[in-house]
Amino acid sequence: MRHMDPVSGMLAIGAGIAIAGGALGTGLAQKDIGTAAVGAVAENTKLFGRSLVFLVVPETLVIFGFVIAFMLYSKII
C-alpha cells in the first residue's frame, strides 16, 4: 500500500473541488438557459441554432475545472 503525503492529499481534494464546482455551476446555468431556449424555440423554430450556442457556452466551466484538476493531478504524480 502506497502512503501519500498530506500535500498530495490536499491537491487531490482541490482537484475534486475544481471538477465538482465546475459541474455544479454548469448544471445551474444550463437549467435556466435550457428552459428559456425551449420556450424560445417553441415560439420560433429559427432560434434553435442560437439557443443551442447559448446552451453550450456554460460547458466551458467544466472544461476549465477539468484543466485545473489535471494540472493539480500532474503535481501529485
Image (tube, rainbow, N blue to C red):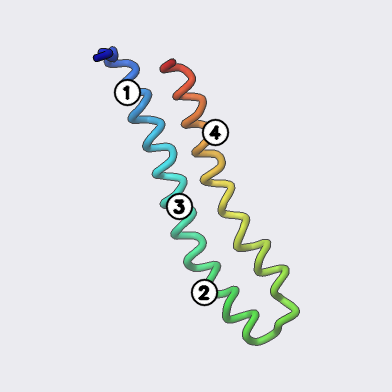
- Pointer 4 local density, CA inside 10 Å: few below 14, some 14–19, many at least 20: some
Nearer-the-camera pick, 46 or 3: 3
Dot placed on the residue nearer the N-terminal end, 1 or 4 = 1
Amino acid bearing label 3: Gly
Mark 1, other Cα within 10 Å: few <14 / some 14–19 / many ≥20? few
Query: Where does label 1 land, which residue?
Result: 10
Q: Which residue is mark 3?
A: 25
Residue 56, picture quadrant: bottom right
On the image, the x and y values in percent for residue 60 come to: 58, 47
Q: Residue furthest front?
A: 1
Measured Cα–Cα span from mark 2 to mark 1? 38 Å
How much space separates mark 1 and mark 4, taking CA atoms?
17 Å
- Amino acid on which disc 4 is placed: Val
Q: Residues within 10 Å of mark 2 (few under 14, many from 20)?
A: few
Quick check: 76 above or below 55?
A: above
Q: Earlier in the sequence, mark 3 or mark 1?
A: 1
Mark 4 highlights which residue? 67
Name the kind of residue labelled 1 in the image: Met
Q: For the C terminus, which image quadrant?
A: top left
As drawn, the label of residue 35 is 2
